[in-house]
């Protein structure tokens, strides 16, 4: 069985607080990104795999879960690669 193709998910989010380290472009229209795999047919169960600062768009569970009928998204947060504000 082949895994469903990954789809790019782009999600608009509210701008961060005053002290958050976001670039000027990111402050204009902040977004988070994810990779979505949805098996065919109607689904009642979905999973999100996410880490505050790691890129999970290529997480190893996305494909196997989709192969087993569970829609899955590997989602990034706005803090990927920057854990300075998580303390």
Image (cartoon, rainbow, N blue to C red):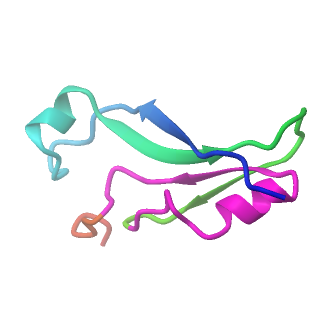
Indicate left or right for 19 with 61 as reference. left
Image quadrant in which the C terminus is located: bottom left
Q: From the viewer's perspective, is residue 52 above or below residue 48?
A: below
Query: Where residue 73 appears, x then y in whole percent?
Result: 62, 50
Q: How many marks?
A: 0
Give the x, y percent position of residue 58: 51, 62
What span is colored magenta in the figure? 54-80
Where, by quadrant of the figure, is residue 25 drawn? top left
Rendered view: 47 above or below 61: above
Q: Tell me if 69 is positioned left or right of 62 in this view.
A: right
59 inside magenta stretch? yes
- Percent position of residue 27, x then y: 18, 34
Query: Where, by quadrant of the figure, is residue 55 drawn?
Result: bottom left
Q: Residue placed at 45% from the left, 33% from the top?
A: 11
| Residue with the most extreme front position | 1
x and y, in percent, of residue 28 in the image: 18, 27
| Depicted 82 relative to depicted 31: above or below | below
Residue at horizontal 37%, vertical 66%? 53
- Residue at horizontal 12 percent and vertical 44 percent from the top: 23
Q: Is residue 23 left or right of residue 51?
A: left
Q: Is residue 49 magenta?
A: no
The quadrant of the rendering that contains the N terminus is: bottom right
Q: Residue at x 77, y 60 (%)?
A: 65
- Nearer to us in this view, 80 or 1: 1
């Amino acid at each position: 069985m082949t895994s469903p193709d990954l789809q790019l998910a782009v999600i608009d989010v509210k701008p961060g607080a005053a002290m958050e380290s976001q670039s000027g472009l990111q402050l204009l229209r902040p977004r988070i990104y994810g990779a979505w795999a949805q098996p065919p047919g109607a689904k009642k169960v979905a999973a999100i795999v996410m880490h505050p600062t790691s890129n999970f768009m290529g997480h190893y569970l996305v494909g196997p879960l989709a192969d087993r009928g569970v829609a899955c998204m590997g989602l990034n947060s706005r803090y990927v690669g920057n854990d300075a504000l998580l303390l």
